[in-house]
Image (spheres, helix red, strand yellow):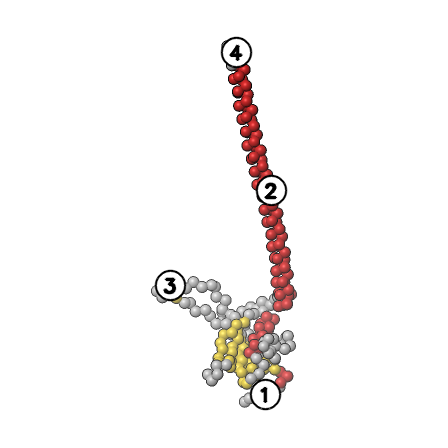
Amino acid sequence: METHIEDKNVVTGGESGVGEVDPIQEPYVGMVFETDKAVKAFYDEYARRKGFFTRIISSRKSDRDGSLISRRLACNKEGFNINRQKPGGVRVRKRESIRGGCKAMIKVTREKPGRWVIKTFEKDHNHGLVISSDKARPAPDDKDRRIRELSLELNHTNQQLAACQEQLRTVLAYIEEHNLGLSKAVENAVYNISEVESDDIMYCKGEFGKFP
Protein backbone atom coordinates (compact mmCIF):
# COMPACT_ATOMS: atom_id res chain seq x y z
CA MET A 1 0.00 0.00 0.00
CA GLU A 2 1.38 3.40 -0.96
CA THR A 3 1.63 5.96 1.81
CA HIS A 4 0.68 9.49 0.77
CA ILE A 5 2.62 12.29 2.44
CA GLU A 6 1.55 15.92 2.47
CA ASP A 7 3.97 18.39 0.91
CA LYS A 8 4.43 20.22 4.23
CA ASN A 9 6.40 17.20 5.49
CA VAL A 10 9.02 17.51 2.76
CA VAL A 11 12.47 18.51 4.03
CA THR A 12 14.11 20.79 1.50
CA GLY A 13 17.81 20.91 0.89
CA GLY A 14 18.70 22.11 -2.60
CA GLU A 15 22.37 22.22 -3.51
CA SER A 16 23.44 23.29 -0.04
CA GLY A 17 22.07 20.13 1.54
CA VAL A 18 20.81 22.08 4.55
CA GLY A 19 17.39 20.82 5.57
CA GLU A 20 14.66 23.15 6.76
CA VAL A 21 13.41 21.04 9.65
CA ASP A 22 12.48 21.26 13.31
CA PRO A 23 15.79 21.06 15.25
CA ILE A 24 14.31 18.45 17.62
CA GLN A 25 12.70 16.39 14.83
CA GLU A 26 13.39 12.65 14.92
CA PRO A 27 13.50 10.55 11.75
CA TYR A 28 10.43 8.45 10.97
CA VAL A 29 9.40 6.05 8.25
CA GLY A 30 7.73 8.03 5.48
CA MET A 31 9.65 11.25 6.09
CA VAL A 32 10.27 12.98 2.75
CA PHE A 33 13.28 14.99 1.55
CA GLU A 34 13.97 16.90 -1.65
CA THR A 35 17.54 15.63 -2.12
CA ASP A 36 19.94 12.99 -0.84
CA LYS A 37 22.10 15.86 0.47
CA ALA A 38 19.18 17.04 2.59
CA VAL A 39 18.85 13.51 3.98
CA LYS A 40 22.49 13.37 5.02
CA ALA A 41 22.46 16.90 6.46
CA PHE A 42 19.36 16.05 8.52
CA TYR A 43 20.72 12.72 9.81
CA ASP A 44 24.11 14.28 10.62
CA GLU A 45 22.40 16.99 12.68
CA TYR A 46 20.18 14.41 14.38
CA ALA A 47 23.28 12.34 15.22
CA ARG A 48 25.10 15.39 16.57
CA ARG A 49 22.24 16.15 18.94
CA LYS A 50 21.95 12.53 20.05
CA GLY A 51 25.70 12.03 20.52
CA PHE A 52 26.97 9.78 17.75
CA PHE A 53 28.63 10.01 14.33
CA THR A 54 27.33 8.80 11.00
CA ARG A 55 28.69 7.27 7.84
CA ILE A 56 27.28 6.11 4.51
CA ILE A 57 27.35 2.30 4.52
CA SER A 58 25.77 1.58 1.15
CA SER A 59 24.41 3.26 -1.97
CA ARG A 60 22.54 1.91 -4.97
CA LYS A 61 22.43 3.37 -8.46
CA SER A 62 19.97 2.93 -11.30
CA ASP A 63 20.90 0.35 -13.93
CA ARG A 64 19.23 2.57 -16.50
CA ASP A 65 21.03 5.89 -16.06
CA GLY A 66 23.45 5.39 -13.17
CA SER A 67 21.72 7.91 -10.90
CA LEU A 68 21.53 7.36 -7.16
CA ILE A 69 18.26 5.71 -6.11
CA SER A 70 18.82 4.52 -2.52
CA ARG A 71 21.22 4.97 0.35
CA ARG A 72 21.78 3.70 3.87
CA LEU A 73 23.29 5.94 6.54
CA ALA A 74 24.22 4.47 9.89
CA CYS A 75 26.01 5.00 13.17
CA ASN A 76 29.78 4.85 12.64
CA LYS A 77 29.91 1.89 15.04
CA GLU A 78 27.82 -0.19 12.61
CA GLY A 79 29.27 -3.55 11.56
CA PHE A 80 32.54 -5.21 12.54
CA ASN A 81 36.06 -4.91 11.21
CA ILE A 82 37.29 -8.00 9.38
CA ASN A 83 40.84 -9.13 10.13
CA ARG A 84 42.88 -9.07 6.95
CA GLN A 85 46.07 -10.93 6.13
CA LYS A 86 48.72 -10.31 3.54
CA PRO A 87 49.88 -13.11 1.24
CA GLY A 88 52.01 -15.50 3.25
CA GLY A 89 49.88 -15.35 6.37
CA VAL A 90 51.23 -12.03 7.65
CA ARG A 91 48.54 -10.20 9.60
CA VAL A 92 47.95 -6.58 8.62
CA ARG A 93 48.43 -4.27 11.55
CA LYS A 94 45.45 -1.99 11.98
CA ARG A 95 44.18 0.64 14.39
CA GLU A 96 41.86 -0.34 17.20
CA SER A 97 38.36 -0.83 15.80
CA ILE A 98 35.58 1.53 16.85
CA ARG A 99 32.88 -0.69 15.35
CA GLY A 100 30.67 -2.82 17.54
CA GLY A 101 27.75 -4.01 15.48
CA CYS A 102 25.44 -1.06 16.19
CA LYS A 103 22.14 -1.33 14.31
CA ALA A 104 21.10 2.35 14.35
CA MET A 105 20.51 3.51 10.76
CA ILE A 106 18.15 4.96 8.18
CA LYS A 107 17.47 3.79 4.64
CA VAL A 108 16.10 6.21 2.05
CA THR A 109 14.96 5.63 -1.51
CA ARG A 110 14.22 8.01 -4.35
CA GLU A 111 10.63 7.62 -5.47
CA LYS A 112 10.78 10.44 -8.01
CA PRO A 113 12.77 13.68 -8.54
CA GLY A 114 12.52 15.83 -5.43
CA ARG A 115 11.15 12.99 -3.30
CA TRP A 116 13.49 10.91 -1.10
CA VAL A 117 11.59 8.85 1.48
CA ILE A 118 12.82 7.17 4.66
CA LYS A 119 11.89 3.49 4.33
CA THR A 120 13.68 2.14 7.41
CA PHE A 121 14.62 3.76 10.69
CA GLU A 122 16.50 1.96 13.48
CA LYS A 123 16.72 4.22 16.52
CA ASP A 124 18.40 2.16 19.23
CA HIS A 125 22.18 1.95 19.72
CA ASN A 126 24.08 -0.84 21.46
CA HIS A 127 26.57 1.58 23.02
CA GLY A 128 26.60 4.75 25.04
CA LEU A 129 26.06 8.15 23.43
CA VAL A 130 28.15 11.22 24.16
CA ILE A 131 26.19 14.44 23.92
CA SER A 132 28.32 17.59 23.72
CA SER A 133 26.95 21.07 24.24
CA ASP A 134 26.56 23.41 21.28
CA LYS A 135 29.01 25.79 22.96
CA ALA A 136 31.72 23.12 22.82
CA ARG A 137 31.15 22.62 19.09
CA PRO A 138 31.67 25.86 17.15
CA ALA A 139 29.39 26.64 14.24
CA PRO A 140 30.90 26.83 10.73
CA ASP A 141 30.82 30.64 10.85
CA ASP A 142 32.67 30.59 14.18
CA LYS A 143 35.28 28.24 12.72
CA ASP A 144 35.83 30.50 9.70
CA ARG A 145 36.11 33.56 11.92
CA ARG A 146 38.56 31.80 14.22
CA ILE A 147 40.63 30.68 11.22
CA ARG A 148 40.78 34.27 9.95
CA GLU A 149 41.78 35.51 13.42
CA LEU A 150 44.54 32.92 13.69
CA SER A 151 45.73 33.73 10.16
CA LEU A 152 45.96 37.43 11.02
CA GLU A 153 47.75 36.61 14.25
CA LEU A 154 50.18 34.35 12.41
CA ASN A 155 50.81 37.06 9.80
CA HIS A 156 51.46 39.62 12.56
CA THR A 157 53.83 37.20 14.31
CA ASN A 158 55.70 36.59 11.05
CA GLN A 159 56.10 40.34 10.57
CA GLN A 160 57.46 40.70 14.10
CA LEU A 161 59.83 37.80 13.46
CA ALA A 162 61.05 39.40 10.23
CA ALA A 163 61.66 42.70 12.08
CA CYS A 164 63.59 40.87 14.81
CA GLN A 165 65.66 39.05 12.19
CA GLU A 166 66.48 42.37 10.50
CA GLN A 167 67.51 43.91 13.84
CA LEU A 168 69.64 40.86 14.59
CA ARG A 169 71.37 41.14 11.22
CA THR A 170 72.06 44.83 11.92
CA VAL A 171 73.53 44.04 15.35
CA LEU A 172 75.67 41.23 13.93
CA ALA A 173 76.92 43.50 11.16
CA TYR A 174 77.81 46.17 13.76
CA ILE A 175 79.61 43.60 15.92
CA GLU A 176 81.52 42.31 12.90
CA GLU A 177 82.52 45.84 11.92
CA HIS A 178 83.50 46.64 15.51
CA ASN A 179 85.58 43.46 15.75
CA LEU A 180 87.30 44.29 12.46
CA GLY A 181 88.16 47.79 13.73
CA LEU A 182 89.36 46.38 17.03
CA SER A 183 91.51 43.82 15.23
CA LYS A 184 93.12 46.57 13.13
CA ALA A 185 93.70 48.65 16.25
CA VAL A 186 95.44 45.71 17.92
CA GLU A 187 97.57 45.12 14.82
CA ASN A 188 98.57 48.80 14.76
CA ALA A 189 99.37 48.71 18.47
CA VAL A 190 101.53 45.60 18.04
CA TYR A 191 103.26 47.20 15.06
CA ASN A 192 103.92 50.43 16.98
CA ILE A 193 105.28 48.51 19.95
CA SER A 194 107.55 46.56 17.63
CA GLU A 195 108.78 49.82 16.07
CA VAL A 196 109.48 51.34 19.49
CA GLU A 197 111.32 48.23 20.65
CA SER A 198 113.38 48.25 17.44
CA ASP A 199 114.27 51.92 17.92
CA ASP A 200 115.25 51.28 21.51
CA ILE A 201 117.50 48.42 20.49
CA MET A 202 119.19 50.52 17.83
CA TYR A 203 119.62 53.38 20.29
CA CYS A 204 121.14 51.12 22.89
CA LYS A 205 123.52 49.64 20.37
CA GLY A 206 124.57 53.11 19.29
CA GLU A 207 125.12 54.37 22.84
CA PHE A 208 127.03 51.34 24.00
CA GLY A 209 129.08 51.40 20.82
CA LYS A 210 130.63 54.71 21.84
CA PHE A 211 132.52 53.10 24.73
CA PRO A 212 135.81 51.26 24.04
- Left or right, 92 with respect to 108, comes to left
Marked residue nearer the N-terminal end (2 or 4): 2
Query: Which label number is shown at residue 4?
Result: 1
The amino acid type found where label 1 is placed reads His
Residue linked to disc 3: 90
Q: Residues within 10 Å of mark 4 (few under 14, many from 20)?
A: few
Residue in the picture at 43% in, 69% down: 82
Q: Position of residue 43 (x, y in %)?
A: 57, 75
Marked residue nearer the N-terminal end (1 or 2): 1
The amino acid type found where label 4 is placed reads Phe
Query: Which label number is shown at residue 156?
Result: none
Q: Position of residue 108 (x, y in %)?
A: 54, 80
Query: Which label number is shown at residue 174?
Result: 2
Residue 120 in view: no
Mark 4 residue element: loop
Q: Nearer the viewer, residue 141 or 176?
A: 176
Q: Position of residue 183 (x, y in %)?
A: 56, 35
| Circles 1 and 2: CB atoms closer than 8 Å | no
Q: Residues within 10 Å of mark 3 (few under 14, many from 20)?
A: few
Mark 2 or 4, closer to the camera: 4
Q: Position of residue 50 (x, y in %)?
A: 59, 71
Mark 2 residue element: helix
Mark 1 or 2, closer to the camera: 2
Disc 2 to disc 4, how far (Cα)? 56 Å
Marked residue nearer the N-terminal end (1 or 3): 1
The amino acid type found where label 3 is placed reads Val
Q: Residues within 10 Å of mark 2 (few under 14, many from 20)?
A: few
Residue in the picture at 55% in, 78% down: 36
Residue linked to disc 4: 211
Marked residue nearer the N-terminal end (1 or 4): 1
